[in-house]
Amino acid sequence: MLKELHTVLPAADLKRAQSFYHDALGLDPDETHEGVLVYHVGSGSVFEIYETSNAGTAQNTQMGWITDDLDAEMNTLRERGVVFEEFDIPDMKTVHGVVTADDMKSAWFRDSEGNFICISQTI
């Protein structure tokens, strides 16, 4: 039976990724293995970052976070140097980095390795 979700992200430079997740998101790995960083976050969520030359090639959301206050989270992340993506494509247009749709608003940024990360708030 499937249980908790475990997300895996690629990184071309593991030290650079570790610095980004520490400096921008305030996260430090709970485990380190050769070529792998493991983070335990929230209520049982786990994500890992592994070193590979394939990093940064995906053009889709690779990991998403839920927050109770998207605006405050975005302000904090911007203060730490995170740049939010702007989109103007069919069915998705950002206003100041935020897409609002039905009962959710979301924003996307890229980590140091080019991975698309989303943060969302139910409204």
Image (cartoon, rainbow, N blue to C red):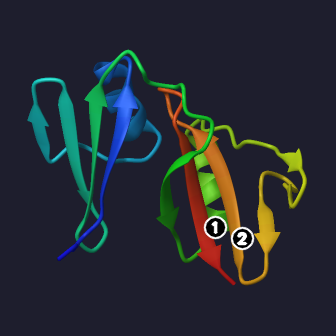
Nearer to me, 56 or 80: 56
Q: Is residue 37 left or right of residue 98?
A: left
User: Residue 75: horizontal and vertical position, in percent?
Assistant: 65, 54
The label nearer to you, 2 versus 1, is 2
The N terminus appears in which quarter of the rendering?
bottom left
Sequence order check: which comes first, mark 2 or mark 1? 1
Q: Residues within 10 Å of mark 1 (few under 14, many from 20)?
A: some
Q: Any mark on residue 23, and which?
A: none
Quadrant of residue 92 within the rendered picture: bottom right
The C terminus appears in which quarter of the rendering?
bottom right
Quadrant of residue 70 within the rendered picture: bottom right
Q: Any mark on residue 105, and which?
A: 2
User: Residue 44: horizontal and vertical position, in percent?
Assistant: 22, 70
Real-space Cα distance between discs 2 and 1? Answer: 8 Å
What is the count of numbered marks?
Answer: 2
Q: Amino acid at mark 1?
A: Leu
Q: Residues within 10 Å of mark 2 (few under 14, many from 20)?
A: some
| Residues at circles 2 and 1 in contact by the CB criterion of under 8 Å | yes
User: Residue 57: horizontal and vertical position, in percent?
Assistant: 54, 25
User: Residue 26: horizontal and vertical position, in percent?
Assistant: 37, 47
Secondary structure of the residue carrying tag 2 is: strand
Q: Is residue 12 left or right of residue 82?
A: left
Q: Any mark on residue 70, and which?
A: 1
Secondary structure of the residue carrying tag 1 is: helix
Q: Is residue 86 left or right of residue 61?
A: right
Seen at 68% across and 56% down, the residue is 107
Nearer to me, 59 or 73: 59
Q: Amino acid at mark 2?
A: Lys
Seen at 84% across and 53% down, the residue is 96
Seen at 42% across and 32% down, the residue is 20
Seen at 51% across and 36% down, the residue is 115
